[in-house]
Image: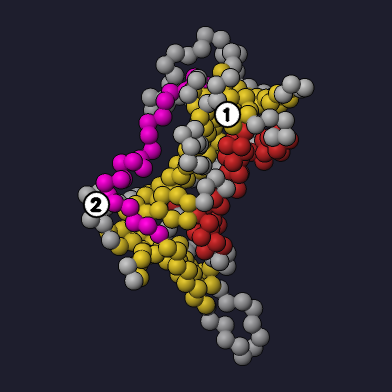
């Protein structure tokens, strides 16, 4: 088993930092599936059956300058269990890096993901040493058996009744933070007439935030609904745990160009963050009303 990859563009280091920071808000650890073309982060927000599930797919060419992987698996894949907290901490040291090299080693029978960070020299006085500094970060990890790889494939998602481009995640985050003081659950609704709303209620009051004049994405790649609603103004409504939806809103750090909400009636709310070479899928289970 061998893996080595390098990053030499600061913006790509920052992009990876933001992705890991977003995922670390959801779970302390994750499974990473390294393939010849992509990195797949798979995590679950907690250990209950009704946990939110999250997948993040990163095309390796969108982050890395060089990328080499060698495995005994038939598809040349490596599956590891790793701490997101430790990975996030290691990536923070690369803010002023010239290059970052990521590699896997085994040390006294313990496997590690190693980040070799070449730091730019700081402003120095005349006569002082201005050579780059090398910082080595070692993150312990667990290598999972090849037989488990199929368990970490992203499942085929059910066809939604409606999908809509969401408003600014920063705006939604401010709204949801206020709503969290009212209720532990959140109603999410959208229609095919470009409108999206959020609602919480209690015995004393109801709060609704409505967002008209958005856009509904075009259906493609076989994702069209089984039966389109006859009335585009008809809303599909789903209830989810507000804490899970609030976790997703940390995705504003990724700076995704497209954020989509899809509602599968009586099954799930599926949220997508999509940017150049990066996709994050967040599946929230439905709470029966």
Drawn side of residue 34 relative to residue 115, left or right: left
Question: Residue 231 is drawn in which quadrant?
Answer: top right
The answer to whether 125 is drawn above or below residue 247 in the figure is below
From the top left corner, tell me how far across and down residue 164 is, in percent.
56, 26
Segment colored magenta: 141-166
Mark 1 sits on what residue?
240
Sequence-earlier tag: 1 or 2: 2
Residue 148 belongs to magenta span: yes
Question: Which residue is depicted at the point 72% across and 30% down?
Answer: 182
How dense is the environment of label 2, judged by Cα within 10 Å: few (below 14), some, or many (20 and up)?
some
Query: Considering the numbered disc 2 on the image, is that residue within a helix, a strand or a loop?
Result: loop
Front position among marks 1 and 2 = 1
Quarter of the image with the N terminus in it: bottom left
Q: Which of the two residues, 50 or 279, is positioned nearer the viewer here?
A: 50
* Mark 1 neighbour class, 10 Å CA radius: few under 14, some 14 to 19, many 20 or more: many
Residue nearest the observer in this picture, 25 or 217: 25
| Label of residue 11 in the image | none
Q: Residue at x 67, y 25 (%)?
A: 199
- Pinpoint residue 102: horizontal percent, then vertical percent: 42, 64
**Vertical order, 246 against 91 (above or below):** above
Residue 138's x, y, as percent?
45, 67
* Pointers 1 and 2 in contact (C-beta within 8 Å): no
Q: Nearer the viewer, residue 282 or 49?
A: 49
Task: Name which quarter of the figure residue 287 lies in.
Answer: top right
Query: x, y percentage for residue 124?
Result: 64, 82
- Residue drawn at x 49%, y 76% as measured from the top left: 134
Q: Is residue 106 above or below residue 134?
A: above
**Residue farthest along the right direction in this orientation:** 204
Check the picture and name the quadrant holding the C terminus.
top right
């Amino acid at each position: 088993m061998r893996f080595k990859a390098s990053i030499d563009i600061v913006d790509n280091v920052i992009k990876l930092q933001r992705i890991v920071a977003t995922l670390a808000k959801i779970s302390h650890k994750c499974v990473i599936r390294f393939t010849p073309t992509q990195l797949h982060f798979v995590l679950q927000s907690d250990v209950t059956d009704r946990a939110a599930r999250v997948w993040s797919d990163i095309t390796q060419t969108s982050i890395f300058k060089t990328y080499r992987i060698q495995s005994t698996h038939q598809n040349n894949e490596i599956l590891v269990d790793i701490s997101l907290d430790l990975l996030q901490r290691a990536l923070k040291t690369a803010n002023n890096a010239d290059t970052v090299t990521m590699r896997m080693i085994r040390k006294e029978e313990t496997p590690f993901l190693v980040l070799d960070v070449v730091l730019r020299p700081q402003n120095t006085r005349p006569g002082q040493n201005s050579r780059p500094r090398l910082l080595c970060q070692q993150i312990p990890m667990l290598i999972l058996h090849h037989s488990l790889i199929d368990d970490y494939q992203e499942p085929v998602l059910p066809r939604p009744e409606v999908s809509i481009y969401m408003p600014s995640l920063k705006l939604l985050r401010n709204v949801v933070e206020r709503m969290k003081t009212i209720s532990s659950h959140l109603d999410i609704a959208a229609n095919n007439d470009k409108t999206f709303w959020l609602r919480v209620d209690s015995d004393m009051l109801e709060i609704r935030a409505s967002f008209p004049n958005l856009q509904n994405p075009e259906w493609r790649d076989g994702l069209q609904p089984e039966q389109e609603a006859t009335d585009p103004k008809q809303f599909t409504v789903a209830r989810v745990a507000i804490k899970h939806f609030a976790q997703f809103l940390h995705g504003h750090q990724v700076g995704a160009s497209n954020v989509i909400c899809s509602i599968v009636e009586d099954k799930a709310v599926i949220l997508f963050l999509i940017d150049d070479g990066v996709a994050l899928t967040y599946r929230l289970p439905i709470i029966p009303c």
